[in-house]
Amino acid sequence: MGFMLATTSNAQVPITLHQVADSVLANNYSIRLIRIDAAVATEQNTLGAAGYYPSISLNGTQQNSLVNTRQEFFNGDIRSADGALNQSASLGIRLDWTLFQGFYVQSIRDELQLKEEAAALQTILTMEAELYEASRLYYEIAAREQLFMSLDTVLIYSQLRADLAKKKMELGKTSRLDYLQSLLDLNADSARWLQERSMLINLKTQLKQKMGASPSISYTLNDTMRALSIFPYEELRANGMRQNTQLRNSKLQEVLAVNGIRTAKSQRYPSLGLFSEYSFISSQSAVGILKSNQSLGPAAGVGLTYNLFNGSQVNREVAVAKLKREGASIQRENVEYSFEMELIQAYEEYLLQYRLVEFEQSNVVLARENVKLAQIQLNAGSINAFQFRDVQQISIESEGRYANALYNLKRSELELMRLSGGLVNYITQHKD
């Protein structure tokens, strides 16, 4: 069975969780896309987009017309022409500036600022989701690799047991049944080894996808899984109330809804604007009182608009904005409540997994010692092959439970960091 213990021919690149996080933040496609959305929100958050600046436009027209015309004056004169050519041209530059619009401009400016902050929070939420999943995969791979190493040892013992059973059978000290059973157990262990190897390959492929890494690169983990000191609950809760990304986003959405009321109410105020222009106008007529007309010069003025009635549309928009604010407030309360419940549940799970790790770790130490003793006794003939197999199976189960407990503990740590708003720093600053 030695062929199954051979490693892949591709070079194994050692990688730490910190390096995984760096690759995810730099190359993950979901994060790269959400960063573009954040950049768009930043580009849109300007004074010009809010309406603080005036608009300046350059306008020009040139018109030629051929008309059949007949003009009759009060003194009895009649002037008529067929295909009379009339020409006109105008060129001007105009400035329009809204000086006051019921605080509409200010509310739009606040809305753009809030939307930029919301886009930044969405970026953090995506980063947390992708980093959580990548880290979860990382720790699952670490757990399975730990179990995989124990399966290597199991295969060695199973091979030794089969060789021993064969020798005893040839010497007539045991039956062929014992030898066949040892081969069946060896094949079962080999099949489990292959299944675990296939699972590891699949998990590493998923991790590379999260990292945005080249499919041809082969990684080997360079960290060890271990339990950290127990996190204090009150500190986690205080941090979460202050920096949990979903909580911050729900509060921001409530502020946006309040600003929406301000925007809707701005329509109840008059609008005051200033305009100025400098224009040139020229016209020529084949028939009429004036043969030509030209004007050149500046103009300026102010305009006032006040909506007296538009079917109570403004009142409806204000009422809708208030309902949206109420909905945002309820949503914020719901997020806060969910945070409290999720944190309590996650912390209880974390404490349970912490105790399980300590318990399973002691079991693994005992199980490994039992296997060594059982191998000695098997060689000495103190126990039979079936008794040794029982000890071996107990050891495999113990190794599996310990690896699974470590994985569940690290996953609980990740969940607590996510809820407390410190997941990104926890992973990017990870030193295992």
Image: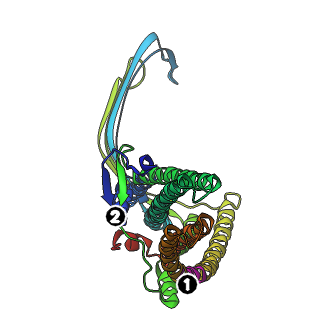
Q: Which residues are magenta?
A: 347-356
Residue 105 rendering spot, x and y as whole percentages: 45, 63
Note whether 181 is above or below 3 in the view shown. below
Pointer 2 or 1: first along the chain: 2
In the drawing, what numbered circle is on residue 355? 1
Going 33% across and 45% down the picture, which residue do you hit?
10
Residue 379 rendering spot, x and y as whole percentages: 49, 67
Residue 100 figure quarter: bottom left
Figure coloring: rainbow
Crowd band around label 1 with a 10 angstrom C-alpha radius: few (<14), some (14–19), many (20+): few
| SS at mark 2 in the image | loop
In the picture, measured across the screen, residue 12 lies left or right of residue 349, that is: left
Residue 301 rendering spot, x and y as whole percentages: 39, 55
Crowd band around label 2 with a 10 angstrom C-alpha radius: few (<14), some (14–19), many (20+): few
User: Mark 2 belongs to which amino acid?
Assistant: Asn
Residue 281 visible in the shown view: yes
Note whether 285 is above or below 4 in the view shown. above
In depth, the one of 319 and 172 nearer the eye is 172
Note whether 34 is above or below 369 in the view shown. above
User: Mark 1 belongs to which amino acid?
Assistant: Arg
Does the residue at mark 2 contact the one at mark 1 (Cβ under 8 Å)?
no
**Distance of mark 2 from mark 1, alpha carbons?**
26 Å
User: Dot 2 corresponds to which residue?
Assistant: 222
In depth, the one of 173 and 134 nearer the eye is 173
The furthest residue to the front: 172
Whether residue 304 appears in magenta in the rendering, the answer is: no
In depth, the one of 332 and 225 nearer the eye is 225
Q: Quadrant of the C terminus?
A: bottom left
The secondary structure that dominates the magenta segment is: helix
Residue 269 figure quarter: bottom right
In the picture, measured across the screen, residue 136 lies left or right of residue 217, that is: right
Residue 248 visible in the shown view: no
